[in-house]
Amino acid sequence: MNNQTERTLVLIKPDAVQRGLVGDIISRLESRGLNISGLKIIKIERTIAEQHYRVHKNRPFFPKLVDFITSSPVVAIVFQGRNAVEVTRNTMGQTNPSEATPGTIRGDFAIDIGRNLIHGSDSIKTAEEEILIFFTGNELLDYEMSTDPWITEP
Ligand code: DAT
Ligand code: MG
């Protein structure tokens, strides 16, 4: 990883898995030019969900958020690339899908804030912390793609 490369955590949430949108969502981020460093399908345990969403623990929606994210499998992915955190957030769209711009994942496939399909880390620091919750070091690969120079100017 060069010093401009970032990693970010994506969770394809239970609603997206159940609706068969996993392929679409991965495809959008992959087509954007991000590379997959790690990927797995998991059922999140409650204590892990509470840790992942701990910044929201005093918000009224916290119990429902934890119920939802633990209700059915999620696909956890670490995407890697230049500005991966910001690029992923922009590709996801606004938190509330009814405000999300068409062309974004949430803006194209969702209407309810409680069913917004995808999680993406909101900063480089948060990404580092969140990745550690879901992946061990040997589950993450750092490799070159032959297309990299066609995606980012060296
Ligand atoms: P994001 O997922 O865009 O990073 P967030 O970190 O502010 O958004 O909130 C985490 C999740 O919590 C979000 O994806 C959906 C849920 N959530 C946020 N605000 C909410 C609200 N006002 N009512 C219900 N659920 C909410
Ligand atoms: Mg967030």
Image (tube, rainbow, N blue to C red):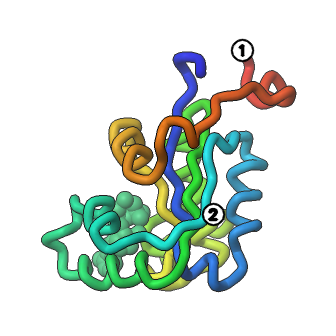
Rendering coords of residue 69 (x, y %): 42, 76
Q: Callout 1: 10 Å neighbours few (<14), some, many (20+)?
A: few
Residue with the most extreme front position? 138
Amino acid on which disc 2 is placed: Thr
Near-viewer residue (100 or 57): 57
Rendering coords of residue 42 (x, y %): 53, 67
Q: Which residue is mark 1?
A: 154
In the rendered image, which quarter contains the C terminus? top right
| Residue drawn at point x = 25 percent, y = 82 percent | 63
Rendering coords of residue 53 (x, y %): 29, 63
Q: Callout 2: 10 Å neighbours few (<14), some, many (20+)?
A: some
Q: Looking at the picture, does residue 1 appear above or below residue 78?
A: above
Q: Looking at the picture, does residue 92 appear above or below residue 70?
A: above
Q: Disc number at residue 3?
A: none
User: Can residue 101 be spotted in the picture?
Assistant: no
Q: Which residue is mark 2?
A: 104
Q: Earlier in the sequence, mark 1 or mark 2?
A: 2
**Distance between mark 1 and mark 2 Cα atoms:** 27 Å
Q: Quadrant of ligand 2?
A: bottom left
